[in-house]
Image (cartoon, rainbow, N blue to C red):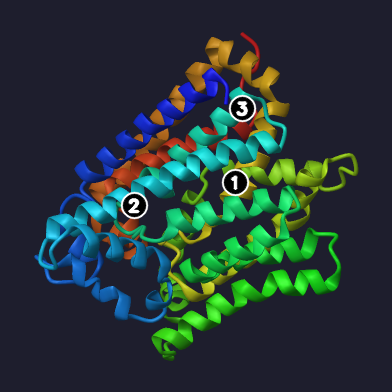
Amino acid sequence: MRRIEFLFFIVFFFLLVAVFALNIIAPGTITSPAHLAIDFASPPDAPQTWAVADWVPTKYRALFRWIVQGTFALFFTPNDANGFYWAFVFWSFVFFYADLIALYFFLRLLNFAEKFSFAGCLLFLISPPVLLAYKYPVYTREEPLAYLLILLGLIAIIQAKPVWIAILGFFAGLTRETTLILPLTYWLTAHDAWRKKILVMIPPIIAVVGVRVLLGYQTYDPFEGSRYNFETPLQSIAFLFMIFGFLWFAFALRLCKRWRDSNADPAWRMLIATAPIVTLLALGTHIAFARAREIRISYILFPWVIPLALDWFRANQDRLRAQIRNPIYRASVCAIFATLSIAIFAFHLTQPELMRLHLADFKNGFWLFLLSVHLTASVALFAPLPKSS
């Protein structure tokens, strides 16, 4: 590891500390043990009961819970709510930080230069599902671990290590069922024999099915979330946009551009070939089986979205530099941000009933501010604005 990369990782650490501090101050799930207890549907003085783990399908997302509870049992007394709180925050931070390190090396494997790999990690940090990971209504719990296992699994696919794919897929299956996009990616892109592919697919499937058998399979209404999504369509659209914000456009444009790129190396061919299907699967299951506002669910797509979006920035860097140097362009962007912000917050202040009716959980000031930022960035980057002074 070069010295500059070591410095990058130090920067990541302190930026992640700032993100966690924001989520503590905001306030959010990790503001205090009592706030954490609300997220876990537990008594205010006993978040360690993790009552939400008795709900279906939450109970089957077990690995992260086992890690936190195991740490708590090892180092703290059973009634120590603060101890449990710090065990949860510790492992959440560790896995988020590991996500950043793994993402950096994943981007390097995709032939991004050091500065672009660093920028890709910054895009990860400023994405709403990370920036407000513990702000209502995101409800982040096991996702940082799931993100890490997906990244490590994709690295294993690139490096043609089927044993590691199977192992990581097994632990991913114990973490969250949506991580099955990892073995699916392997199945669709690997050139291994059918027998080997089947052997690699077995451990993740065993994990997903086995944890349901081990913890007791229960039926539930899987479409409760989708009904809510269609009852609040504007809120659903707003939150789905905020999964990646302006990065959605860069991702889509670059994917269309590179779709027929026969000269791409194997790592890029893997991403390009699987991006449409994993995007449809992740978004489709999210909309059908969960509430759109829980944007952490579809953020599992970031190993596809961030590299392709970053590739768009790399391809357009000269034009973007010229635009940024243009004072008319900068003034236009500021005017767009001011106009959107004033319009959004004026509506928020003057029409609270309409906000509650149509946007419900999106009316919080943090979300409205981020909406202004991402809408402005979308217009500034992808709409024709003045290019010369």
Picture coordinates of residue 101, whole percent (x, y): 51, 38
- Residue 220 image point, x, y percent: 42, 88
- Tell me the mark number nearer the camera, choosing from 1 and 2: 2
Q: Amino acid at mark 1?
A: Trp
Amino acid, disc 2: Trp
- Quadrant of the snapshot with the N terminus: top right
Q: Pointer 1: what residue?
A: 248
- In the rendered image, which residue does mark 2 sit on? 91
The secondary element bearing badge 2 is classed as helix
Between disc 1 and disc 2, whose residue precedes?
2
Query: Is residue 295 in sight in this rendering?
Result: no
> Which of the two marks, 3 or 1, is nearer to us in this view?
3
Residue highlighted by disc 3: 116
Q: Are marks 3 and 1 in contact (CB under 8 Å)?
A: no
Near-viewer residue (246 or 341): 246
Q: Earlier in the sequence, mark 3 or mark 2?
A: 2
Report how far apart the C-alphas of labels 3 and 2 lie in the structure.
28 Å
Between disc 3 and disc 2, the foreground one is 2
Disc 1/disc 2 C-alpha distance (Å): 29 Å
Residue in the picture at 38% in, 32% down: 13
Residue placed most toward the observer, 322 or 281: 281
Q: Is residue 105 left or right of residue 316?
A: left
